[in-house]
Amino acid sequence: MLSRVSLRVNGEVRAVELDTRTTLLDALREHLHLTGSKKGCDHGQCGACTVMLGGQRIYSCLTLAIMHEGESVTTIEGLGQPGNLHPMQAAFVKHDGYQCGYCTPGQICASVAALEEIGAGIPSHVTADLTASPRFTVEEIRERMSGNICRCGAYSNIIDAISEIAERPA
């Protein structure tokens, strides 16, 4: 069964006609031709498909596009472009926070959202005091990024890139 779905993708309203079983990831990649988000495991276990939905990170392979009618989706393409990189993208380049690059779009989207979560006072499983706002620590970032797998093992470089952005004045 086909259904028309309208999403605000990277600030632009995009309408597509999709099978109602189409995942958000497949809608982005196959129908809107935004191929930055990757299909890794297709089971929500690797994080390569991470995008931001209403500012929160989400595994786009685990949700149907039709469930997000009218919502705002930000993909890696919406964060920055060559010559005008998002600060997190530039930090990943500076700190070599990628190896093969396959996980990098998901890692960057997740890291931007993770820092926003900390800034919004959303605790994680390692937040020591749930009555106080979480603070940026390497332990917080490791926990928040734990759903994004890097098969090449660039984790220390990814932490360095996120740390650089987190330590900048807002």
Image (cartoon, rainbow, N blue to C red):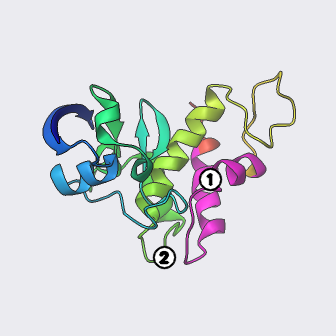
Q: Is residue 32 left or right of residue 45?
A: left
Q: Is residue 79 above or below residue 169?
A: below
Name which residue lies at 80% across and 43% down: 126
Residue 134 highlighted magenta (yes or no): no
Q: Which of the image's four quarters has the N terminus?
A: top left
Judge the density around disc 2: few (<14), some (14-19), many (≥20) Cα neighbours within 10 Å: some
Quickly name the residue at label 2: 99
Q: Residue at 59% across / 39% down in the picture?
A: 115
- How many angstroms separate mark 1 from mark 2 (CA)? 17 Å
Q: Position of residue 73 (x, y in %)?
A: 34, 37
- Left or right of 137? Residue 17 is left
Local SS, label 2: loop
Q: Position of residue 129 (x, y in %)?
A: 86, 30
Depth order, front residue of 109/33:
33
* The magenta segment: 139-165
Q: Residue at x 80, y 37 (%)?
A: 127
Q: Which mark is residue 145?
A: 1
Q: In this view of the protein, which residue sits in the foreground, 31 or 11? A: 31
Q: Where is residue 135, by image quadrant?
A: top right
Q: Position of residue 117 (x, y in %)?
A: 60, 33
Image quadrant containing the C terminus: top right
Q: Give the camera-side residue of 21 and 135.
A: 21
- Front label number (1 vs 2): 1
Residue 123 versus residue 94 in the image, above or below: above
Residue type beneath disc 1: Met
Q: In the orientation shown, which residue stands out farthest toward the front?
A: 1
* Contact, mark 1 vs mark 2 (Cβ under 8 Å): no
Q: Is residue 143 magenta?
A: yes
